[in-house]
Image (spheres, grey):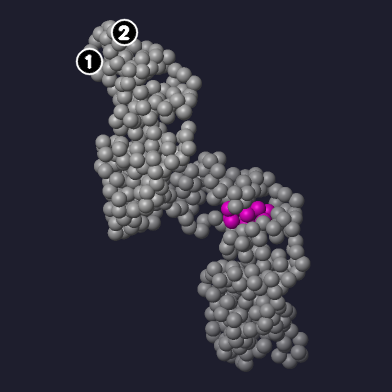
Amino acid sequence: MKTKSYALGLALALLLPWFAHAEDPAPGPAKTTIDLKYWVEFAKQGNAAAQYGLGYRYANGQGVERDDTQALEWYQKAAAQGNPQAQYALAYMYANGRGIEADQKQANDWYLKSAQSGNADAQYSIGYSLANGRGMKVDNEQAVNWYQKSAAQGQAQAQYALGYMYANGLGVQQDHAIALGWYRKSADQGHTDAQYALGYMYDNGQGTAEDQAGALEWYRKAADLGDAQGQYALAYAYANGRGVEQSDTDAYSWYKKAAEKGRADAQYAIGYSLANGLGVAKDYRQALQWYRKSADQGRSDAQYALGYLYANGQGVKVDDTTAVKWYRKSADQGDAQGQYGLAFMYAGGRGVAKDYRKAFEWYGKSAAQGNADAQYALGYISENGQGTAPDKAAAAGWYRKAADQNNSQGQYALAYLYYHGDGIAKDYGKAVDLFRKAAEQGDARAEYGLGYLYYNGYGVPKDAGVAADWFNKAAAKGLPEAQHGLSYMEANGEGPIRDLGPLGEGRAAGKESGQPPAWVVFRLLMALLP
């Protein structure tokens, strides 16, 4: 028996825009048209601009061999004279541990000096440190103050960061319209995080009317510049037909670009696409590889999917021990599917010693999160006293929760209890309704059950024609009970409909002797397995 398939639809949502990129801008270039010997001469004479320029050459290996120690020395000389560029460059060296041991506090001190002198990059960087508690206490109001100064000078990262602060109400009153304006200024300069954020706001109607076509335009700009977030968003739009004609092929192509840049959600999407043949030929081996990449980054749905492939021998030999390992990783993160998978393995003694108590525990965790398969399974083991005392009333409660989510197994099981009046008041009408719901989803047992009720007139008027229709559906799926039912109907011709006896345990009386024909034994499947 296989665990329930994870192929329930690719439920990957777009993430909120990220906070401003943590990487401080690299120090700006110095003039390099002047011959190096003059830079050295002017720098030795104490010219601060030349000292900064010489430091920049050493830091970047321009005309000289790269030497961070020399770069640091010249930046220090220029910074000591109050040169804002050198102060910023010195801060950058401290922040990144270049030529000296990394020291964020020293970096912030120099960022602040440079910022106070009007350097836009330094204003952004000190704002970022304040917003993120980088070497100093978090102060969003002061962060916004510095972002504003930098953004007013056209610094794209600061414009994006300021938009983020307004979008999330950090240090300022939340205002999506103002956020949209700052995101646009940054996006127009080619800042990909801002382009994605702008697309997100159009997509969700934040600060503007919802506009999927407009969102797509900005996602594409970010994607075309190689931004993984934009590539993922564009793939998501194609996968779901948002602002563009739905195309699994195009979705796969963009997911692949984002996945190759290391995005765990995109790696999961590629694995899912390969496992289900969406936009690409089905390939479980490749799916396994991509799920593993995503799972190794801690994504719980990928860990569950990886466990599923090992449990069912898809793309790899069946390996229950490895399946349990991945199910457990997923379950320990609170993933409802992972919890269900782990419970299933405990219930079946696959990869672990059979332990119904642990199965009951993990099914319970998954069911509490609304997992319909786990709710059904919890009902089943409650009904049968596996890992807990038998309790048909509790079983009926869990079956109902699963049935309310349109889970066909839950609908069938609850209908069965209504038919027998086990743990719940007998009600043929409700049994008919639930059998019908499950039957309409193709559940062969429910198709047979519904036909049985029509044949005997339980909860519905007797109708052999309708009964035969449902028996045929179930028989076509190979259900023996339905095949026997059709044989019985054929043997009895057009005569009066006979009571076939209680569902699940009854027999049909013989015409003359009162003995049941050997082939007529009607019962529903009793092996209700998860």
Magenta region: which residues?
335-345
Q: Are marks 2 and 1 in contact (CB under 8 Å)?
A: no
* Residue 529 picture location, percent across and down: 67, 64
Q: In the image, is residue 260 above or below residue 344?
A: above
**Which labelled disc corresponds to residue 312?**
none
Q: Which residue is mark 2?
A: 44
Instruction: Residue at 48%, 25% (x, y): give it.
Output: 103
**Which labelled disc corresponds to residue 33?**
1
As drawn, is 383 to the left or to the right of 19? Answer: right
Q: Which secondary structure, mark 2?
A: helix
Q: Which secondary structure, mark 1?
A: loop
As drawn, is 75 to the left or to the right of 445? Answer: left
Residue type indicated by callout 1: Thr
Residue type indicated by callout 2: Lys
Label 2 vs label 1, nearer the camera:
2
Q: Which callout, 2 or 1, points at the residue further toward the start of the chain?
A: 1
